Structure formats: structure tokens, C-alpha cells
Amino acid sequence: TEPKMPGFVPLYQSWESFYTRNLYRRVRDCWNRPICSVVGAETEVLERKSNDYGWNFELTDRRLKVMNFGSYNYLGFAEKEGPCVDAVEENIKLCGLSSCGSRQELGYQEIHKELDDLVAEFLGVEAAITVPMGFATNSMNMPCLVGKGSLILSDELNHASLVLGSRLSGAMIKTFKHNDMQDLEAKLRDAVVVGQPRTHRPWKKILIVVEGVYSMEGSIINLPDVIRLKKKYKAYLYLDEAHSMGAIGPNGRGVVEYFGLIPKDVDIMMGTFTKSFCSSGGYIGGNKRLINYLRVQSHAAMYSPSMPPPVVQQIISTMSIIMGLDGTNEGKKRIQQLKWNLRYLRRRLHEMGFIIYGNKDSPIVPLLVYIPSKTVALSRECLARGMGIVVVGFPATPISESRARFCLSAAHTKEMLDKALNILDEVGDLLRLKYSKMTPPKF
Ligand code: PMP
């Protein structure tokens, strides 16, 4: 990959294998920190034995209290004292911990139906189906939607679950450049004869697959143009809103609301409950025909147990708050707080001289570190100062674009953000990460 910063030494192919085989073993501590408390805005991690950077994973029993900028707790519902905890506790007493069966085999409780209906109402679609795992929602449902003889046009940065789902479907897969509408249109033009009905072209179906917010880039999909193109070329649209549902849009209804579009224009609306709802599982929303079809075709719905009732209760409680069904404006306040927090952090980091990627409204703020070894140093230096962050590098990013990813939360207070910014200011100087204030070296 061409390095973006001027004056950087290019990295070579052999680096790739060296990095994955040798270096990762030594830097594993940055990605395997056992948490021993709730993953709220502040959390506790178990300290490792000094110099334990290998495979052995030796831990001490010392707990380290850190500010948490790595969890997808966008609206702060992961907190121990959250408004949903009582309802979840009650639900355990009422329904127990497990559904002990799939939807077809007595695993479909009243609460699951309540959730399906609430999700449909939240999305503004006719119907929805919920599945116990977000990853499986993509990988197991996509093969029901398209197959051999169909074409998938997939954004090059789509999540692994979308990639797996596409591959399992057996359809022909073509990728287009990330969020590049010209490239998408070129691929669509290649695939169809404009003006012809769906039946007069070589593909049974064409499915465009995109995400709402891209978690590595912090970018927001250009949904108005994607919808325009899918209509023009008579394709279907699959939208994964894992990182946007709850976190984006004035009422937290995702990118569709953010751009003021109509939910009906997205054929398949997918999302997960692990982010804004601080629970687990995923959903697909769409018209009744689609959802009824998935109920009997999807492996995720047919062959895996339905969600544990307390997990469902957490989603129902958080979603009701976001929708204002609890009679308060708590949900709106959280959405606004998240927005304020992320804009504040983004602006201050930019002023300090860091290179920040992504859209100003994305709940994830990627800070470019570029050099892989520096991500490790950044992670360790931040942890030593009481700040837990997530760093990502190859193969999740191009090798020369390693980065830190700050996941913002409505539960972060201004003091926390200021403390975090002071830490990053200090560590940024120490590791020379304020690239926009540096003069490129002359060769
Ligand atoms: N889609 C996207 C875009 C994701 O980022 C993720 C995971 N972060 C998933 C699907 C899978 O969701 P889950 O982690 O809830 O299984």
C-alpha cells in the first residue's frame, strides 16, 4: 500500500508475514486484556505480570481502573446502575436465563414476539426477525437472500460477517471502492442493461451490500446515492447498521433517519444489539414477505436457540428509552450527549495536531498512528496513565495505516474527555504522533 504521509519509508511484502508471524506474538497484550468489571465508561482490567508479552498470558490479581474508550457502549446503557437493570433482574425471575430451544421448538417466548414487533416499529418497517448473534445475522441470512446466478456488489471495507455471508451464498461477488459512488455505478453499469426489467439481464438478482457507519474508518455511507443507484439499476439493498442504529440520527434511528430517507427504500435492514443497546444479537427488518420467508429459511432462526430472555429484556428496555416510550426524554438526552462528546473529542484531537479519519457524526473516532509498532506503544502508554483504548493494524487496516479507535459513549463526562485529551497530548508528544504539526523530513 502506498503510504499516505510524505517522507515515509515504504513497507515491503515480506513485512506482512514477519508482522503476523513474529510481531503479533509480542504485542498480544494490547488485545487480550481481561476485564473484571462492567464495561462502562470506566472499567477494571487485570494487570499482567511485567514483561509478559508472549503467548503465556500470565496475570496478577491486581485490578487496574481505567477510563474505557474501547467498548461499543455508545449510549451508556452498559453501566451497572443503568435504568434497565431492574427490568432485566425481574425478567430473570420470570423467564429464567435460557430459551432452551430454537424458535421452532418451544424456544419462542412471548418476549421474543414483543421484541420482533418493537424492532419493526423502531425501524419503521412492516416486520422484523431477531437472531441471537449479530455475526450470524449476516453470515446466515445472506445465503437465504441470494445464491448462484446472483451478483453481490459489496463495499470493499464491509465487515467480516458480510464477507462470510456473501461467500456462503454462492453468488458472484464484486467489490467496489469504499463509499465510492462512481465505482459502484460503473460496476452496476457493467452488470445490467439500463432500462431493462430485472428478468432481461444475466443476473437473477443484484444485491448491493453496505454498512451505515464503517467502524475502522468512522465514515458514513452515502446512502442517498446508494438508494438512487439501486433504483436506477433495479438492484436490492442490504444495509448493516451495527454501528449506526441508536447512535446516529436525531432520534437514534440510524443512517436512514440521518439523511431524512424512507425506510422502505432499503430492502433489507440489518443491525446488531451489541452496540447502542449493550446487549447481544441482531435483527433483519423489511417487508412481511421477506421476514416470513426468513423465519422458515434462515439457519440462524431455525437451528440456533432464540435469545435468552434477559438479553431480550435489555434490548426492549433500552429501545423503549431511545424511542421515548418510557415517557421521559432520557433517550434523546443520551443521543445528544454522545453527539456532543464525539464532536468535542474530534475537534480537540484535530487541534492538537493528530490526524483523524471519518465523519464528524460517527460514534467512532479513528486516530491515525501509521506505524504498527507505535500502536503498541500508544496502547501501553495510555493504559499506564489510566486509559484503555483499542488499537488496530494489519490485517484489519492497510499495513501502513495502523490506528487507534476511540469508541465514544454518552456515559463519558466532560472531565473524562479532558483527562483523556491530556493523556493523549502527552503520549502524542512522547511518540511523535502529531503528524499534522510536523514538517516532513527532506531526502
Ligand atoms: N456487522 C458489523 C458492521 C459489525 O461491526 C459487527 C461486529 N462489530 C457485526 C456485524 C457483528 O455483530 P456482533 O458483534 O453483534 O455479533
Image (cartoon, rainbow, N blue to C red):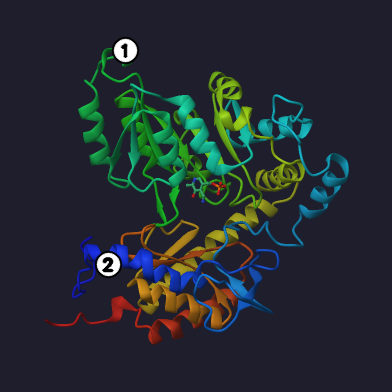
Q: Amino acid at mark 2?
A: Trp
Q: Which mark is residue 15?
A: 2
Residue drawn at (22%, 29%) of the image:
189
- Where is mark 1, residue-wise? 199
Residue drawn at (76%, 36%) of the image:
100
Mark 1 closeness class: few <14, some 14–19, many ≥20 residues within 10 Å = few
Residue drawn at (63%, 57%) of the image:
334
Q: Secondary structure at mark 1?
A: helix
Give percent across and percent down for residue 23: 38, 71
Would you say 64 lies left or right of 196 here? Answer: right
Q: Which mark is residue 161?
A: none
Of residue 247 and residue 100, the one placed in the foreground of this image is 100
Give percent across and percent down for residue 65: 66, 77
Q: Is residue 432 above or below residue 400?
A: below
Q: Quadrant of residue 7?
A: bottom left
Q: Amino acid at mark 1?
A: Thr
Location of the N terminus (image quadrant)? bottom left
Of residue 26 and residue 349, the one placed in the foreground of this image is 26
Say if disc 1 is inside 8 Å of ligand 1.
Answer: no
Would you say 165 lies left or right of 88 here? Answer: left
Of residue 249 and residue 434, the one placed in the foreground of this image is 434
Q: Residue furthest right?
A: 93
Location of the C terminus (image quadrant)? bottom left
Q: Residue furthest front?
A: 56
Q: Quadrant of residue 338?
A: bottom right
Q: Quadrant of residue 426?
A: bottom left
